[in-house]
Amino acid sequence: QVQLVESGGGSVQAGGSLRLSCTGSRNSFSMGWFRQAPGKEREGVAAIRIDGYTTYAEYVKGRFTISKDNAKNTLYLQMNSLKPDDTAMYYCAAGNVYTLRRERYNYWGQGTQVTVSS
């Protein structure tokens, strides 16, 4: 069973940066970052395939970068130029399908809060 633990969230002003980490990926075929704001559905942010291929939601392209360190069994999300709209709980997930669709991921972390103030 895959157990995922996120860290790195916090509060930052607009324009700032944060790097999220997720341990426990165990070389899953696809790893993803998702986020959920209050009153909204959980949405896909970025995903990385086992061979390193990546995909991003349009609203984070050019600002966020997903990466992984297989030796450390850790997934990352570097978030730059943060906006108040990026405020949400961020989750990492592992699954067998390379996609940003949340329903295709089997394992989830507990989430880490990101708050961006204007």
Image (cartoon, rainbow, N blue to C red):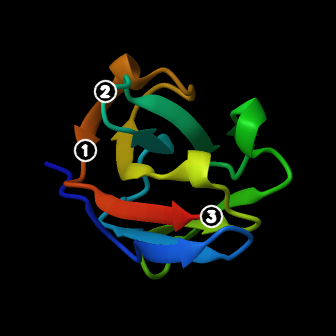
Residue 90: x percent and y percent? 39, 52
User: Circle 1 sits in a helix, a strand or a loop, which is it?
Assistant: strand
Residue 96: x percent and y percent? 41, 30
In the image, 22 versus 27, the foreground residue is 22
Amino acid tagged 2: Gly
Horizontal placement of 67 versus 25: left or right? right
Residue 37: x percent and y percent? 39, 39
Question: Where is mark 1, residue-wise?
Answer: 108
Q: Nearer the viewer, mark 3 or mark 2?
A: 3
Amino acid tagged 1: Trp
Question: Where is mark 3, residue-wise?
Answer: 118
Q: CA distance from mark 1 to mark 3?
A: 30 Å
Mark earlier in primary sequence (1, 3): 1
Question: Where is mark 2, residue-wise?
Answer: 39
Horizontal placement of 109 versus 54: left or right? left
Mark earlier in primary sequence (3, 2): 2
Which residue shows up at 43% across the image and 42% down it? 35
Q: Residues within 10 Å of mark 1 (few under 14, many from 20)?
A: many
Q: CA distance from mark 2 to mark 1?
A: 20 Å
